[in-house]
Amino acid sequence: MRENENHQAVRAVLESWAKATRENRKDDILKNHAAELVIFDVLPPLRYDSAASYRASWGDWQPQSQGEVQFDLENVVVHASDELSTAHCLIRCGGTLPGGRSFQDLVRATFCLRKRADSWEVFHQHISKPLPSRGQQMNPDDTHANDETELRALIARWSQAVRNKDMSGIRADHDPDILMFDVPPPFLSRGIDAYMATWPQFLNWSTRPMKFELTDIEIAAGRDVAFATAVGHCNGAENGGEPEELLFRLTVGFRKQNGRWRIVHEHHSVPATD
């Protein structure tokens, strides 16, 4: 199996685990985990020495939530050979408790996997949160730094999706009610369907190799609202004409919902010429 196929297979295992967790399909959550699994989890005990002992603990600490549950893998990085793999990511989780109170959290996760009979299985899983020193509160500046890191990663995912012409990736981090002001008509695009309908025109205009780069990115992040400014660089051609580079200004508005940043507004423009 080629290296990229190993990466894809490992990612699929992790995404399957996350999806089963979101959907509370208890029989499927550990289907790709080894029976002799070793787990270091956020809460006590110090370790679990088997998948069975880990599953037996769920009733003691798993919150009983109602409605949609968030359990999303972010910034997944995979290193894989033909036999072993490691992966690390952030996990953003949240939901609503039966009494109506919402909860949300962000944890760190590391996975070790091995291949058995051409299938990848997790044989070690380590999930944690930072632990402040006794009497110490988490520094708000750390939270803001984390928010900026997440927003920069979101912007990078979006611009990479544009370069890949990946329509699902372009859509992924946008709010259903997004409002966009773009360079070409229409005057505005309201809602995710109208927003996505603008992309084929741009992608058809773009020349090869695809260029869509953002520079001079500046981010200001508050508790649940943020914005970013950038200069965009792309190239394309009108009706088979000569390729030309286009510089544009970009402002992006974000809102944090259930612990996850989403794009609620984009404003693309170039200076008027008349």
Image (cartoon, rainbow, N blue to C red):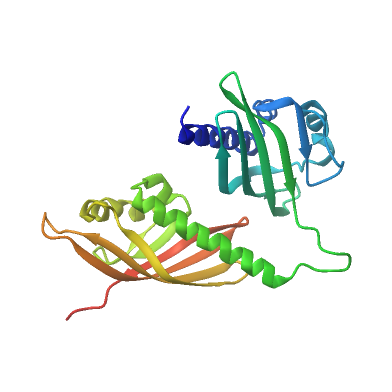
Q: Residue at x 53, y 62 (%)?
A: 151
Say left or right for 141 vs 179. right
Q: Quadrant of residue 238?
A: bottom left
The image shows a total of numbered marks equal to: 0
Can the viewer see residue 80 in this picture? yes
Say left or right for 229 vs 30. left
Can the viewer see residue 175 in this picture? no
Residue 53 versus residue 208: which sits nearer the camera? 208
Q: Residue at x 70, y 71 (%)?
A: 140
Residue 168: image x %, image y %?
41, 45
Residue 274: image x %, image y %?
17, 81
Q: Residue at x 51, y 62 (%)?
A: 152
Q: Is residue 89 above or below residue 186?
A: above
Q: Is residue 120 above or below residue 100?
A: above
Residue 5 versus residue 172: which sits nearer the camera? 5
Q: Quadrant of residue 87?
A: top right
Residue 46: image x %, image y %?
86, 42
Q: Residue furthest bottom?
A: 274
Q: Residue at x 52, y 36 (%)?
A: 7
Say left or right for 249 vs 243. right
Q: Quadrant of residue 260?
A: bottom right
Residue 43: image x %, image y %?
82, 46
Say left or right for 171 vs 126. left
